């Protein structure tokens, strides 16, 4: 076997290794139900859950509790299957949090609450102006 | 309405597209025809075509600038991205706030590069310009904004559309089609930063430069000049590497200064999309240099040069098609161009692959096996590492694309990007960086010395010894105790020392060849800088109050943020941190002014001074002066004290509706050894109602001291005043003003509540001391006992939540970058000389 062949085999092995670890480290979009199932099976990988904030009949966001020293907060969120869940976040509330149309939380269950490591917001009209002020 | 300028712009756009096609066709003919007379004629045609094309591209830029500079807000671009207050130098930045403008920038650079190429090449002009013109045609089609009749397919998005056509749903245009807004919505305040004036042009110049080696390579394959394209392409590839690298780092520096991620690199898909082509470009440069010296690695060079350009197109597709959508915070929205972008990408991908396959067998290869002691072997290892490094970033960055492809074939996929991107990428890239560090030391060594096993040991002894000593020093002095960082530090030091040795030898013999050594020293310094600044970044604001917010939270919840009340110092990590209040920054003066010293006006950008404003012992404004400020920016004065050193930082919060409300930017205190980096994480909402406590009453005599919320206060005087601002006083009316002195933590404050009797009715105007959260009201006057009743309300003091980080030795990274770019520059100068020499001989 020539040296270059060994070399090529090593490269292919590394590339396959990269693909496998990428697939292994990639997160997934799941529902709260599945996330809970995963956590109770001892799988503490971070996953993505997509949902909305809970709102009352007037469209006001309800269920937000802010910590007294304002460095953390918790809120209620409904996933796409309609399951309502309390989410804890150890960062200050992102500005415009309550205005968001859609919330993606990245994290995992700890007991009965979902602990978010990251929150992604989908706000209305983030880049495009839709109205003109006369 | 100014229709003419927009129509003119649109004509320029269409002609730029047409002329690019004309140039493409002419140069194509000039390349394929053998008859020298006809060839000459077609060449002339092509040149005229491209010149007109360049002029029209310039015309597009000038007309758009005219629209923006003259504030023609009937145009969507001007309305959406500029306003009347914007200073001239930021008018330029509006070009890259919108997607159409950034395509124009790209067109502009490539037009200029095309003209340079026409004038510097003889033999290569026709085939190279064929590729160039075709790419220009594709780019121009992106801003065409033409609807094909019958098919209803819109090609491109024009920057010259009118507001009423862009927002045809807006009710105002149904009532009043001729409506022109008085002012625009303004440039995104994030982009109002000097780095944002120079970063995008640099990056796009880098993009444009990758087209040059690609065009030479395709020309070489096309004309079967497999060996000859490398020499003219090499200086351009080096320039591209330098410019693209600078552009990327400028973006990183801007992010470090302006965004609150806490770093210069966040592994966001948009950042990765330019990082990958740069890595491959650097790999391509290495194989091209190898080929120039030893006739090996030609095929690798061809593949890599083509890959770089295709990756640039792929990154354009990723960031502009909207496919990243939820995955990235700063990608553009879809302008309906995704199909067009995909065609652009696939066309060049397929065309180059087909061309390579057709020509593959004819490309000369070297049969000899590279020995382990040959330089080619080591360089090849290095380029392979660079490629794998890029591949490792490419795979996960493309996850949204994989999802789309799976869906296209009817499957369903729920893969998401790794939850912690920084951790995920760093874990891999760190080890690649170690290999790169070691190889760029060893590889350079082999490059300059043809040596065997025995000699190798002898030659390497001293440098390894020096590296080890330096390494031991840095590890102990810098307290580096983590295994992977120790290894990374060694790799960095090793390459610096080895390349320094080479540099000294070269400086004595032939300094013009020192580019490689300098560039690799830069790489070593960058590795060290990254290792320290990211690996040993320390959170200074660690929350150690023990205040539990929520009992359900487990202790592992790290609290990196800290709540600070105004004028209440908190000690942590060796620092005393104190919040001193909200500040504005005047537009035309340096320094900050306190919000409590000014009155707001109807215009958010103008305030009026309540008293003389003195900054650093210099009087900036007199009382009642109106001051121009940036109304959307509030600065939070944070003082950090360590020993007898005192640093004042002004992190910023910006009201920025385009980016989702409030946006924080850090302030950085720089020292030679570390940066102290602070940003606000949460601030008091500017329109929130304040909650006051119940009124507390005190009855006091003049000069009698009393406690207002634990602050020693005294009523100094009571005076009748002739007039009260905003109140019409008649003859019978009386107004008195009390002066109450309050001793705060940092000096005395004066509250001046007013008591007035107007038309036999009692009125009270309270006064507030913002810094102390106190409000005084003069409730009653008792002339019989010479006493006064004062009411006091208290509220929660002003607060801010901050995060502070210490980033050690980050300057090593910035200096390393400059050294790397200098190295590229030296190497490029050498290759240009080489090319000139050959051109004079009539060989190019």
Image: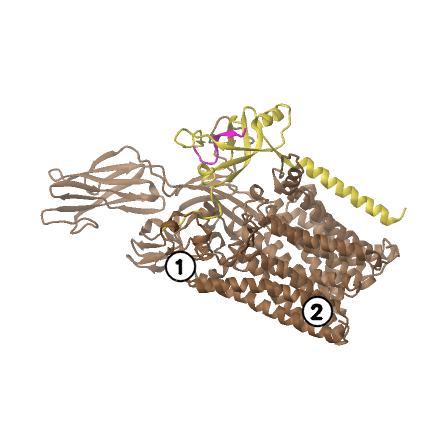
Chain colours: A yellow, B brown
Q: Observer-nearest residue: A123 or B824?
A: A123
Is A14 displayed left or right of A123 in the figure?
right
Above/below status of B138 relative to B490: below
Above/below status of B32 relative to B95: below
Residues rendered magenta in the picture: A68-80
Q: Dot 1: what SS?
A: loop
Quick check: can you spot residue B126?
Answer: yes
Is B62 displayed left or right of B737 in the figure?
right
Q: Residue at x 34, y 60 (%)?
A: B619
Q: Residue at x 11, y 49 (%)?
A: B730
Above/below status of B546 relative to B389: above
Q: Which mark is residue B421?
A: none
Image coordinates of residue B789 in percent, x first then y, are: 19, 37
Q: Which residue is mark 1?
A: B84
Q: Residue furthest right?
A: A1
Q: Observer-nearest residue: A100 or B445?
A: A100
Q: Is disc 2 surrounded by few (<14), some (14 to 19) or many (20+) residues within 10 Å?
A: many
Q: Which residue is mark 2?
A: B125
Q: Is disc 1 surrounded by few (<14), some (14 to 19) or many (20+) residues within 10 Å?
A: some
């Amino acid at each position: 076997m020539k040296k270059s062949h060994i070399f090529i085999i090593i490269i292919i092995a590394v590339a396959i290794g990269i693909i496998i670890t990428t697939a292994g480290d990639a997160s997934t979009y799941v529902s709260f139900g599945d996330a809970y199932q995963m956590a109770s099976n001892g799988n503490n990988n971070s996953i993505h859950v997509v949902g909305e904030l809970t709102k009352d009949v007037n469209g006001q966001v309800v269920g937000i509790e802010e910590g007294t020293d304002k460095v953390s907060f918790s809120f209620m969120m409904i996933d796409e299957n309609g399951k309502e869940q309390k989410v804890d976040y150890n960062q200050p509330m992102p500005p415009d949090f309550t205005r968001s149309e859609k919330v993606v939380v990245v994290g995992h269950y700890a007991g009965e609450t979902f602990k978010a490591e990251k929150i992604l917001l989908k706000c209305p009209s983030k880049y495009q102006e839709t109205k003109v002020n006369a | 309405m100014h229709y003419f300028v927009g129509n003119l712009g649109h004509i320029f756009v269409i002609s730029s597209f047409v002329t690019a096609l004309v140039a493409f066709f002419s140069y194509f003919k000039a390349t394929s025809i053998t008859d020298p007379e006809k060839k000459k004629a077609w060449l002339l045609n092509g040149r005229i075509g491209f010149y007109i094309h360049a002029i029209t591209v310039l015309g597009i830029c000038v007309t758009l600038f005219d629209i923006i500079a003259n504030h023609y807000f009937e145009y969507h671009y001007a309305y959406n991205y500029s306003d009347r207050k914007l200073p001239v130098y930021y008018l330029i930045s509006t070009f890259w706030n919108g997607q159409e403008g950034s395509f124009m920038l790209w067109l502009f650079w490539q037009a200029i590069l095309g003209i340079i190429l026409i004038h510097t090449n003889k033999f290569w002009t026709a085939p190279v310009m064929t590729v160039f013109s075709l790419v220009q045609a594709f780019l121009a089609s992106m801003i065409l904004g033409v609807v094909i009749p019958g098919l209803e397919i819109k090609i491109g998005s024009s920057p010259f559309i009118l507001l009423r056509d862009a927002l045809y749903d807006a009710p105002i245009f149904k009532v009043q089609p001729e409506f022109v807004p008085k002012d625009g919505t303004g440039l995104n305040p994030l982009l109002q930063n000097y780095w944002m004036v120079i970063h995008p042009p640099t990056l796009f110049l880098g993009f444009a430069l990758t087209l040059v080696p690609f065009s030479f390579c395709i020309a070489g394959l096309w004309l079967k000049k497999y060996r000859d394209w490398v020499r003219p392409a090499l200086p351009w590839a080096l320039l591209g590497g330098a410019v693209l690298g600078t552009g990327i780092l400028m973006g990183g520096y801007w992010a470090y200064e302006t965004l609150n991620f806490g770093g210069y690199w966040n592994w966001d898909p948009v950042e990765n999309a330019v990082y990958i082509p740069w890595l491959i470009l650097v790999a391509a440069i290495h194989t091209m240099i190898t080929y120039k010296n030893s006739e090996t690695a030609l095929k690798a060079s061809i593949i890599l040069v083509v890959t770089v350009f295709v990756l640039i197109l792929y990154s354009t597709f990723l960031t502009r098609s909207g496919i990243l959508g939820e995955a990235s915070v700063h990608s553009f929205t879809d302008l309906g161009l995704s199909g067009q972008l995909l065609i652009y990408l696939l066309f060049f991908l397929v065309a180059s692959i087909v061309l390579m396959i057709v020509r593959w067998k004819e490309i000369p290869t070297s049969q000899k096996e590279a020995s382990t002691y040959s330089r080619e072997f080591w360089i090849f290892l290095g380029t392979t590492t660079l490629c794998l490094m890029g591949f490792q970033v490419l795979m996960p960055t493309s996850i949204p694309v994989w999802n789309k492809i799976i869906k296209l074939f009817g499957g369903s996929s729920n893969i998401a990007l790794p939850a912690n991107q920084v951790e995920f990428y760093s874990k891999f890239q760190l080890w690649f960086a170690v290999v790169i560090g070691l190889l760029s030391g060893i590889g350079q060594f082999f490059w300059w010395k043809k040596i065997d096993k025995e000699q190798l040991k002898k030659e390497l002894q001293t440098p390894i010894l020096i590296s080890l000593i330096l390494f031991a020093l840095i590890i102990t002095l810098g307290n580096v105790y983590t295994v992977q960082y120790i290894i990374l530090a060694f790799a960095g030091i090793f390459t610096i020392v080895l390349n320094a040795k080479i540099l000294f030898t070269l400086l004595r013999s032939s300094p013009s060849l020192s580019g490689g050594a300098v560039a690799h020293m830069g790489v070593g310094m960058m590795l060290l800088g990254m290792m320290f600044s990211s690996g040993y970044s320390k959170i200074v604001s660690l929350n150690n109050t023990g205040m539990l917010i929520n009992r359900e939270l487990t202790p592992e919840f790290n609290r990196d943020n800290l709540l600070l009340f105004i004028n209440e110092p908190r000690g942590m990590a060796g620092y005393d941190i104190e919040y001193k209040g909200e500040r504005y920054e005047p537009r035309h003066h340096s320094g900050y002014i306190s919000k409590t010293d000014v009155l707001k006006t109807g215009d958010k950008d103008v305030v009026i001074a309540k008293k003389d404003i003195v900054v650093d012992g210099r009087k900036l404004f007199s009382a009642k002066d109106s001051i121009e400020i940036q109304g959307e920016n509030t600065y939070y004065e944070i003082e950090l004290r360590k020993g007898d050193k005192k640093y004042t930082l002004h992190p910023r919060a910006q009201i920025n509706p385009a980016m989702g409300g409030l946006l924080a930017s850090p302030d950085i205190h720089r020292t030679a050894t570390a940066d102290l980096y602070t940003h606000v994480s949460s601030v008091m909402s500017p329109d929130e109602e304040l909650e006051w406590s119940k009124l507390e009453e005190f009855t006091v005599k003049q000069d009698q001291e009393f406690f207002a919320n634990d602050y020693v206060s005294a009523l100094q005087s009571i005076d009748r005043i002739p007039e009260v601002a905003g109140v019409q006083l008649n003859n019978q009316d009386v107004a008195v003003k009390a002066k109450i002195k309050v001793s705060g933590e940092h000096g005395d404050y004066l509250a001046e509540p007013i008591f007035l009797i107007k038309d036999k009715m009692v009125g009270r105007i309270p006064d507030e001391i913002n810094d102390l959260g106190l409000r005084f009201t003069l409730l009653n006057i008792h002339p019989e006992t010479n006493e006064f009743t004062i009411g006091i309300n208290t509220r929660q003091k002003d607060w801010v939540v901050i995060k502070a980080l210490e980033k050690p030795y980050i300057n090593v990274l910035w200096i390393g970058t400059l050294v790397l770019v200098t190295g590229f520059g030296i190497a490029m100068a050498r290759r240009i000389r080489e090319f000139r020499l050959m051109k004079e001989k009539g060989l190019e």
